[in-house]
Image (tube, rainbow, N blue to C red):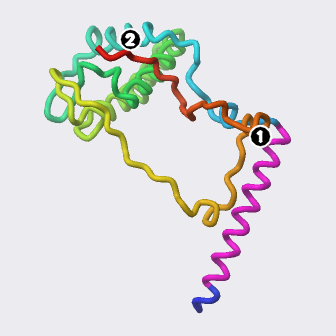
């Protein structure tokens, strides 16, 4: 294929992508759906003290896992956003599962708890720089926005609440509302 043909196809894909995004926005606006309605979120009413109690009971009183070179732990687990998010999701799902039969509870244990704990405890997971005696602050990934997004992907779609109000009301786009901690 000639370079000109490839460039032309690339332009056509960009135009079609922009058209698809435009049609998606029209559909979302027609049904008044925003991101928060499309994707399930943890219940905002979860009490963080309940989550902490659950973590202490599960981690300390129920599970017999120990920290090692291949299984990391941090005494200040609540200072790690990923861990906090995972434990809240596990807590909320556990509250639903504990009402059901033993088979469902067993599946939750193997398919949810074990998988989250594998990610949390992994040597390259959120506790990688921590030890059972010492906390190391969360560093996160360095993420940059695409400076050519408008050109590469077309105009950014407005979220339903932004389109209505002209702003996102200063809200951070997060799935989990993390409790505020005060420095000690």
> Quadrant location of the C terminus?
top left
> With respect to residue 156, does 47 lie above or below?
above
Q: Going 69% across and 63% down the picture, which residue do you hit?
A: 17
Residue 64 is inside the magenta segment: no
The residue stretch that appears in magenta: 6-31
How many marks are shown on the rendered structure?
2
Q: Is residue 127 left or right of residue 55?
A: left
Question: Is any atom of residue 118 visible in this view?
Answer: no
Q: Residue 153 location, x and y as percent?
A: 63, 61
Name the one closer to the observer, 51 or 139. Answer: 139
Q: Is the magenta stretch mostly helix, strand or loop?
A: helix
Q: Residue at x 40, y 29 (%)?
A: 81
* Contact between labelled residues 1 and 2, with CB atoms less than 8 Å apart: no
The picture places residue 7, in percent across and down from the top left corner, at 62, 82
Asked if residue 48 is positioned above or below residue 139 in the image, the reply reads above
Residue 89 image offset from top left, x and y in percent: 48, 23
Labelled disc at residue 163: 1
- The residue labelled by disc 2 is 52
Mark 2 or mark 1: whose residue is earlier in sequence: 2
Question: Which residue is at the far right?
Answer: 30
Residue located at (46% from left, 14% from top): 102
Asked whether 111 or 139 is in front, the reply is 139
SS type, badge 1 = helix
Residue 8 appears in which quarter of the rendering? bottom right
57 to the left or right of 66: right
- Left or right, residue 77 beside residue 104: left
Marks 2 and 1, Cα distance to the nearest angstrom? 38 Å
Q: Badge 2 local density, few (<14 within 10 Å), some, or many (20+)?
A: some
Q: Residue 97: in sight, yes or no?
A: yes
């Amino acid at each position: 294929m000639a370079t000109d043909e490839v460039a032309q196809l690339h332009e056509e894909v960009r135009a079609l992508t922009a058209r698809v995004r435009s049609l998606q926005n029209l559909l979302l606006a027609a049904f008044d759906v925003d991101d928060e309605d499309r994707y399930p979120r943890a219940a905002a009413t979860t009490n963080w003290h309940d989550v902490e109690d659950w973590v202490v009971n599960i981690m300390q009183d129920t599970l017999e896992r120990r920290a090692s070179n291949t299984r990391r732990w941090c005494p200040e687990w609540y200072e790690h956003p990923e861990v906090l998010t995972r434990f809240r999701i596990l807590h909320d799902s556990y509250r639903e599962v504990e009402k059901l039969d033993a088979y469902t509870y067993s599946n939750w244990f193997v398919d949810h708890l074990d998988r989250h704990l594998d990610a949390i405890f992994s040597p390259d997971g959120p506790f990688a720089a921590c030890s059972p005696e010492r906390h190391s602050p969360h560093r996160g990934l360095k993420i940059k926005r695409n400076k050519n997004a408008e050109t590469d992907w077309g105009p950014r779609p407005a979220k339903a609440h932004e389109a209505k109000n002209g702003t996102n009301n200063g809200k951070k786009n997060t799935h989990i509302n993390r409790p505020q901690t005060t420095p000690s």
